Image: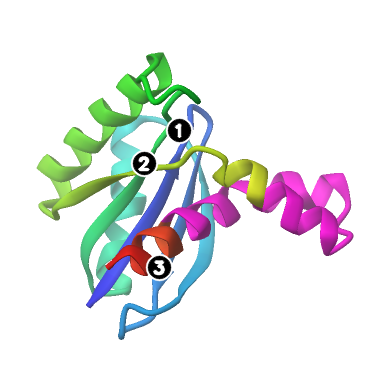
Amino acid sequence: MRILGLDIGDRTIGVAVCDPLGITAQGITTIRRKNEDVDIEQLKDICNKYDVESIVSGLPKNMNGTLGPQSKKVIEFCKIIEERIKLPIKMWDERLTTVAANRAMLEADLSRKKRKKIVDKMAATYILQGYLDSI
């Protein structure tokens, strides 16, 4: 049972996948967004490569739990993913995942340049691991 974790942003999509037993999440890549067709094709290739059965996407809620403009963009893009890739998608509250990812990288003493390159992949890992821990 492989699950894909996504941290969807306007410029990038952080991607993580769980191990075959569904216990741990590993970051695999950050997709630089180009256009809808290219983005979907890259996600489809990853899903095929890892034999993914479902997807968990971070849902960027406001701190008070409400949905803002970014949440609506993510929900719309997830609907497109579901239609075109034909895999079920669950939404997962992603509040503070990027903060946690940045904190972990600071503690690992990574440079700002390195952190910028992998923060989305790390956030996707936190999103997916949070979901895996809940099930």
Mark 3: few, some, or many residues within 10 Å (few <14, many ≥20)?
many
Q: Position of residue 126 (x, y in %)?
A: 51, 57
Q: Position of residue 12 (x, y in %)?
A: 52, 38
In the image, the segment drawn in magenta is 101-127
Looking at the image, the residue that sits furthest to the front is 64
Nearer the observer, disc 3 or disc 1? 3
Q: Which label's residue is closer to the chain start, 1 or 2?
A: 1
Residue corresponding to mark 1: 34
Residue for point 65% across, 52% down: 101
Q: Is residue 90 above or below residue 73?
A: below
Residue for point 10% across, 41% down: 83
113 inside magenta stretch: yes
What quarter of the picture does the N terminus occupy? bottom left
Residue 107 lies left or right of residue 32; in this view the side is right
Residue for point 43% across, 31% down: 60
Number of the label disc, if any, that sits on residue 100: none
Q: CA distance from mark 2 to mark 3?
A: 17 Å
Residue 19 lies left or right of residue 97; in this view the side is left
Q: Are marks 1 and 2 in contact (CB under 8 Å)?
A: yes
Q: Is residue 73 above or below residue 58?
A: above
